[in-house]
Every structure is written in C-alpha cells, then in structure tokens.
Image (spheres, rainbow, N blue to C red):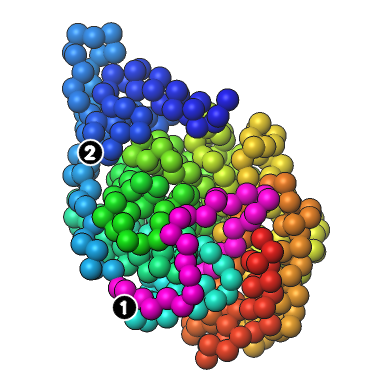
Amino acid sequence: MDPNSRQRRWLRRMMLLTGCAGAIGAAPTMAAPIVVPGLPPVCVFGCAPSNPGSPSGPAPTPAPTSPAAPALPPPDNAIPRCSVRGRVARAAPAGPSTQRRAFGEHASLRYFSGRSLCRRADLTRAAGVRYVREDANWGEIEAHRGRFDWRRMDEVFGVAAQYGLTVLPVPDAPPRWAGPSERNLPDDIVAYAGLTARVAARYGPGGTFWVRHPRLPYRPARYIELYNEPYYPEFSGGHPDPARYARLVAAAVPAGRLANPSVRFLIAGESTYTPDGGHTFGNWIEGMYAAVPGFGRLFDGIAVHPYSDPAPPTFYDPTSGALQARRLERVRAALVAHGDAAKHLWVTEVGWSTCPSSCVNERQQAADLRSFFHLTRTRWRSYVDAVFVYALQDYRTSPVREGHFGVLRLNGSQKPAWSALRSAARRG
C-alpha cells in the first residue's frame, strides 16, 4: 500500500478521535486538527466546534498562537525578470530517485536580490545542478506573530524557477516570540507547524505561489527539510534533544500534509549527538523513534550531512571520534532496523574546505568530491537520492575554515571541484 495513503488514513483516524472537523488535503483555511502523539490535540488553522454531547467530547481549544490564513502572493511583477540564456523547460522534471539523483548546491540565493539574484542563479545553473537548498528564515517571514512577509522567499522561488532550479526549503531560525534565539529549536511548536503548512501550501505542487505566477517555469517544492542540524549544539541552544525535535516533527508534518498532500518531508538525521558538550553521547535516530510512537509514519526521508573534512570520504573507523562520511550507513541501518528501509537518504550538505591551514588543497577537494559521488553511485546506490554540495562560492567569515568550502573561489574563478560537480550532475 502507498505509504501516503496509510498516512492519510492514520490522520483521518486521529481526526475522528479528537472530534475536530477537517479534510485531508483541504486548504489551510479550512479546519484541520494537528495531532501530536503523546500531546493534547492542537489546531493550527482553527477547528470547527464539535457537538458537546458527542462521544468524542468537546473540541480542543484552538491554540492562541493560531495565525490567520495565508494571504495570496504579491502580483507577478514582484518577481525580477531575468535574461535567461538557453532554454528552460516549463514542466517540472521528475523527482529524484536512486536511478536519477538530484544534484544541488548551497547557493545562498536569499542573500541576493534583483539583478544580482539573477546572476547568482545563472551561476548556480552553470554548475550543472538543478536544485538549491535555501533557509526559509522564520524570523524574517513572521517577525511579528501573525504578520507574514513572503517577499524574500517569493523572489528566491521565482528567480530560481526561471533558471530551472527547484528549491528545497528549510524552515528554521525562529523569531524571538517563538523561541529563545534563531539558533535554537522553537518553544512554540504549534506556530512552527503553522509555518510549515504555509510553506507547503504556498510553494508545494499546486501551491498559491504557482497559481499566481503561471508564466514561470513550474518548479514546485516537492520536499521540505525540517530544520537545519538540530543535533548540533550550535542549532539547539547548546543542548541537542532528539525527543524535542521529534515532537516538532510530529506537529509539523501532519500540518504540512493537511495543507498540501503532495509535499514530502525530510527530517534531520545523524548517527550520534552529545547533549552536554561532549561528556556523554546518545543515538540521535533511536532517540527520535523512542520519543514519538509511530514516528516512522511522520517522514518521507532523512537529510544527512556526512562531512568528513579533512579526511577523505572513504575513510572509516568505527572506533574513531573523527567526522566520517560513511557514518550515514549507521543512519541507514537504524532506519532498516525500525522497518523503514523504504525511506531514503538525502545528503543535503557535504563538502571539503580549502582553508589556508589544516584543510585540504583544491586538488584534493575535487578528488574527495569525486570519491563521494562514486560512493553514491555504488555502495549507497540503493538508498541515496540526492547530493547537495556545500557550497557554491567561498566567502569571508570567521572561523576561516567555514568560508572556503566553495567550488568557486572568492573572486569567482573555478576550483577543480567545479568540474567534478558538473560532471557528476550531468551523469546523475
């Protein structure tokens, strides 16, 4: 049976148990309950009151943070018109698979606007990729509760589409009213579920953005990645917690699927994590499964970031604490152990830095990327569907290492890794 059909049946069953009105696949303006296993039911877009005398009991109280229904996108002329060289097919390409992998880049499109955004998208397309991973910065979209500003994301999706690029959005970076900082998981998971639903309804297949922009090449977001690296202290307030993240997923995915049943969801996967700065270690995947009953029903794939910098991707020592690319095999093994072998992996970040000291040189960076791409075609062929290289271009930053992962140098000239990426992307 189609796993999405099972998911919809499960959601319907949950809806009946909670006594809320709503229909699977309905627009987010309709009543739709969001059931988080182990938590009281909440309503992201508002629930119709049930009959107080019914066996299901009174309807849940709508969450006070429930935002209004999303507004339609701005007019078509809000999107820059780029002078695109070559032909871009209007129809969306087939989704990624183990037969035809998706190759993407971290192009940082959202930091550009107008003509500079067009030039950046053109440069990204020249690398041979057809996907880009972009933060859907919640703090920018909804800086004030219930007031949404989609201009930045609309511009990114609109320009990317003109160049035949499909965006993988990553809703993250909560506003201050929803969490302690943008580098932490939100405290208000209901509001995050609402954001996820809006992103799905707006940019997913058949979404309002595409309805209002029919002249654009059709490049809907078929996948949404839920948060960036919550297993690292840098993005979890210093204390990663797989149970907390799993509850976030359990709220966001049903909301997103109710808003747009065609969208698929990737969760953040890692082999281990440390909640206390390296004193103790835990199993990230097992922690998520243990926290939420039926957790496997709540996602369609796992996003992994198997950095091994500066070691090559072929290096593997299970007893070593160093970063190793092949640790993604442990993530895969955990999925299989839980009966979720059908769920594949997306490598949504990977790369090697060419910083001036303690990093690889440019020739080795290219060799490591080629080796990694070879592993996706051979050893990992049956379960890795996508590879997103970090990053398109070097940039100035501190620490220095972070700013030298690009396949282009700071001045825009090509490193050898540029050719390695183009060749792999063409091959698929």
- Which residue lies at the image location 48% right of the left edge and 70% below the top edge? 87
Specify the label residue 114 is tagged with. 1
Quarter holding the N terminus is top right
Residue type (three-letter) at the residue carrying disc 1 = Gly
The quarter holding residue 402 reads bottom right
Query: What's the CA distance linking mark 2 and mark 1?
Result: 32 Å
> Which residue corresponds to the image point at 19% horizontal and 55% vertical from the top-left?
147
| Residue of label 2 | 29
| Label annotation for residue 164 | none
Is residue 372 or residue 292 the one in the foreground?
A: 372
Asked whether the residues under the numbered discs 2 and 1 touch, taking CB atoms below 8 Å apart as contact, a structural biologist would say no
Residue 104, magenta (yes or no): yes
Q: Which numbered disc, 2 or 1, marks the residue closer to the eye? A: 1
Main secondary-structure element of the magenta-colored stretch: loop
Crowding at mark 1 (Cα within 10 Å: few <14, some 14-19, many 20+): some
Three-letter code, disc 2 = Thr
- Please provide percent x and percent y for residue 265: 48, 45
Q: How many marks?
A: 2
Residue 87 visible in the current orientation = yes
Q: Nearer the viewer, residue 97 or 65?
A: 97
Residue 414, image x, y percentages: 61, 85
The span picked out in magenta is 80-106
Q: Position of residue 80 (x, y in %)?
A: 30, 73
Against 37, residue 428 (above or below) is below
The one nearer the camera, 306 or 391, is 391
User: Which sits earlier in the primary sequence, circle 2 or circle 1?
Assistant: 2
Picture residue at 44% right of the left edge, 44% below the top: 263
Give above or below for 237 relative to 87: above
Q: Is residue 80 above or below residue 234?
A: below
User: For the residue carrying disc 2, how many other residues have a C-alpha within 10 Å: few (<14), some (14-19), or many (20+)?
Assistant: few
